[in-house]
Image: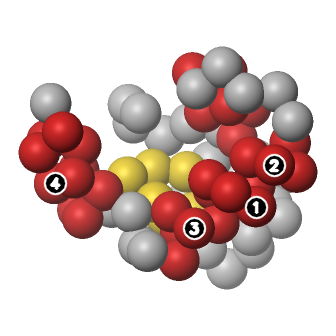
Amino acid sequence: MEGEMKRTEIMNAMNLSHRGNFITNYLMPAIKQELLEYTHPEHPNHPKQKYRLTNSGKELKQSLQ
């Protein structure tokens, strides 16, 4: 993940197509573990919502490379 990305962009990068499965098994767990954060945290369903790595997410990414 690089910079801010839409849900569909993340799904495409991961080669996933089922929206519900992605949200339940990948997106929400990453947000709960504070690896990803909303760009519009006050409105999770904002039409222009994107996601970005938190500092913890960046550290994990760095450790996996």
The colour scheme used here is secondary structure
Verify CB contact (< 8 Å) between mark 1 and mark 3: no
Q: Is residue 4 left or right of residue 28?
A: left
Kind of residue sitting beneath label 3: Pro
User: Which residue bears the numbered disc 4?
Assistant: 59
Q: Which mark is residue 29?
A: 3
How far is the residue under mark 3 from the one under mark 2?
12 Å
How far is the residue under mark 1 from the one under mark 2?
5 Å
Residue 19 position within the rendered picture, expressed as x and y whole percent measured from the top left: 86, 42
Residue depth check, mark 4 versus mark 2: number of the one nearer the observer: 2
Kind of residue sitting beneath label 4: Glu
Q: Residue at x 24, y 64 (%)?
A: 56
Q: Residues within 10 Å of mark 2 (few under 14, many from 20)?
A: few
Verify CB contact (< 8 Å) between mark 3 and mark 2: no
Residue depth check, mark 4 versus mark 3: number of the one nearer the observer: 3
How far is the residue under mark 4 from the one under mark 1?
23 Å
How far is the residue under mark 4 from the one under mark 2?
26 Å
Verify CB contact (< 8 Å) between mark 4 and mark 2: no
Q: Is residue 64 left or right of residue 8?
A: left
Q: Is residue 40 visible?
A: no
Q: Is residue 49 visible?
A: yes
Q: Is residue 10 above or below residue 47?
A: above
Residue 24 position within the rendered picture, expressed as x and y whole percent measured from the top left: 76, 61
Nearest to N terminus: mark 1 or mark 3: 1
Nearest to N terminus: mark 4 or mark 2: 2
Verify CB contact (< 8 Å) between mark 1 and mark 2: yes
Kind of residue sitting beneath label 2: Asn
Verify CB contact (< 8 Å) between mark 4 and mark 1: no
User: Which residue bears the numbered disc 2?
Assistant: 21
User: Which residue bears the numbered disc 1?
Assistant: 24
